[in-house]
């Protein structure tokens, strides 16, 4: 195992580490959904001098070296560009990460009452262990869009004065049959419904009028706070996530415990690096995408044409409209597909091959390939590209490691790397090692967060 990098830091580096990780925790608290991440990222980008690409186009201006612009797709996907000295058609340095995380979504006809309790019917999103989501405080985030186009933001359960929600579990005293089930069957997907109420609308109304009075009370409260009718659930996007803030973890405060660090630990560190680097030879890009956890599909996933179309707009505003130059720009680009890696966990050592595992406090992790078993569904990075990255990291004093995702025949996973590699660009997976990946609360090392920012800065300057 490599040297634990905590022992290598100077006082100045430790201070920078604390500044970065403090800012990172604040971003985790403010960005618990992809919409919230995009909104927060735009605010930070504008404070750093970035302008909306649409506004620049409307003004009729051309883009030149040093200009900083961003483009948004449906409020759930964001691309930031800093124009470099070389033409865009010569290639870009791209940091790509996803901002969606495993969670539980509210269905479109969700609200019902059952034996004096009111619930929201749900459908889980991404790969989760369902039993991990019961019997803990949960919050509700998202938007409600009314027929007139009015968008109302919802966030309940994060402030100290807010109520929280829960998915109930069977008491252990009656759980003999439940405990004999396989872990995948302990909690059924249709039982992940959110408990939202127990009080009738009016405690003094006659018994014959009390049918679904608890549901009626919930609707009355939604109407009062959000001007929301029951039918408005059909055009709402409401996500159930763990309530509470990101916290320091460990007596030594060396780690961070929080929801959504897959993959926001890579998304926010990429954003920090993008905002920090003010000039470079090549055009830099930070691409934050949605839907990775369900296959990168849909209009806001990496399989969409949003990024390609945005690059075409940039080419038109810098080199003149040319489909060939768009293709060259994509083919000549280099990318870090910034996604988390599985951290070696000695409590479950049997799942890992130790020599090929990522370790906490060993720096940013590079995965030459992901996929499953025989590298199925994986991008496999070229050795020449890896050598160039090694040199860039060493020159910048960045701690890094190479790893695979667990034992060869045990399972596997994927990222957006293979999608971008379809353009012919050089792509490799890189990111931060995570414990408890896809659980409601995940753990990362502060040292690895710091090294990720340093590594992404070095990459943008390559």
Image: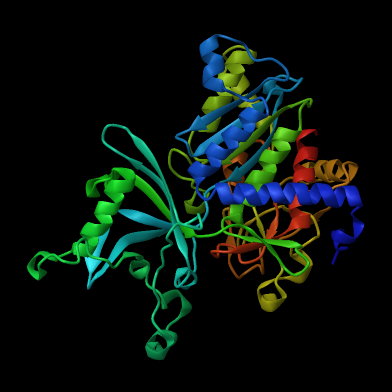
Q: Is residue 123 above or below residue 380?
A: below
Query: Viewer-proximal residue, 365 or 407?
Result: 365
122 left or right of 447 in image: left
262 left or right of 243 in image: right
The quadrant of the picture occupied by the N terminus is bottom right
29 left or right of 12 in image: left
Residue 246: image quadrant is bottom right
Residue 125 visible in this rendered orientation of the protein = no
Query: Viewer-proximal residue, 282 or 422?
Result: 282
| Residue 232 horizontal/vertical position (percent) | 27, 45
227 left or right of 173 in image: left
Farthest residue in the top direction?
A: 60
Which residue: 74% across, 65% down? Answer: 357
Which residue: 58% across, 57% down? Answer: 245
Q: Is residue 315 above or below residue 431?
A: above
Which residue: 78% across, 56% down? Answer: 447
Q: Is residue 333 above or below residue 175?
A: above
Residue 198 visible in this rendered orientation of the protein = yes
């Amino acid at each position: 195992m490599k040297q634990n990098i905590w022992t290598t830091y100077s006082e100045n580096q430790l201070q920078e580490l604390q500044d970065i990780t403090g800012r990172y925790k604040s971003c985790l608290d403010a960005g618990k959904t992809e919409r919230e991440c995009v909104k927060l990222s735009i605010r930070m980008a504008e404070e750093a001098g970035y302008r909306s690409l649409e506004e620049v186009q409307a003004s009729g201006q051309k883009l030149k070296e040093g200009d900083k612009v961003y483009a948004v797709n449906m409020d759930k996907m964001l691309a930031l560009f800093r124009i470099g000295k070389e033409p865009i058609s010569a290639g870009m340095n791209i940091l790509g990460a996803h901002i969606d995380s495993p969670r539980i979504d509210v269905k479109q006809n969700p609200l019902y009452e059952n034996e004096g309790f009111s619930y929201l019917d749900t459908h889980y999103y991404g790969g989760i262990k369902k039993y991990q989501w019961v019997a803990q405080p949960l919050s509700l985030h998202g938007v409600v869009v009314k027929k007139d186009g009015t968008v109302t933001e919802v966030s309940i359960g994060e402030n100290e004065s807010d109520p929280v929600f829960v998915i109930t579990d069977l008491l252990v005293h009656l759980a003999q049959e439940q405990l004999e089930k396989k872990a995948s069957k302990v909690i059924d997907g249709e039982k992940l419904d959110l408990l939202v109420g127990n009080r009738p609308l009016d405690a003094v109304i006659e018994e014959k009028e009390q049918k679904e009075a608890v549901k009626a009370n919930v609707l009355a409260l939604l109407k009062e706070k959000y001007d929301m009718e029951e039918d408005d659930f059909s055009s709402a996007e409401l996500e159930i996530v763990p309530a509470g803030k990101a916290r320091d973890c460990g007596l030594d405060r060396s780690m961070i415990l929080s929801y959504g660090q897959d993959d926001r630990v890579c998304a926010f560190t990429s954003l920090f690096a993008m905002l920090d680097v003010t000039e470079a030879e090549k055009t830099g890009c930070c691409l934050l995408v949605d839907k990775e956890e369900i296959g990168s599909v849909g209009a806001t996933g990496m399989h969409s044409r949003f990024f390609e179309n945005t690059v075409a707009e940039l080419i038109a505003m810098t080199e003149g409209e040319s489909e060939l130059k768009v293709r060259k720009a994509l083919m000549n680009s280099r990318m870090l597909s910034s996604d988390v890696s599985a951290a070696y966990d000695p409590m479950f050592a049997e799942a890992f091959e130790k020599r090929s595992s990522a370790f906490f406090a060993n720096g940013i992790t590079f995965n030459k390939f992901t996929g499953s078993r025989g590298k199925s569904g994986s991008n496999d990075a070229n050795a020449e590209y890896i050598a160039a990255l090694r040199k860039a990291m060493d020159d910048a004093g960045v701690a890094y490691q190479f790893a695979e995702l667990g034992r060869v025949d045990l399972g596997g996973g994927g990222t957006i790397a293979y999608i971008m590699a379809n353009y012919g660009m050089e792509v490799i997976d890189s990111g931060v090692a995570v414990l408890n990946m896809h659980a409601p609360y995940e753990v990362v090392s502060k040292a690895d967060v710091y090294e990720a920012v340093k590594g992404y800065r070095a990459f943008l300057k390559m």
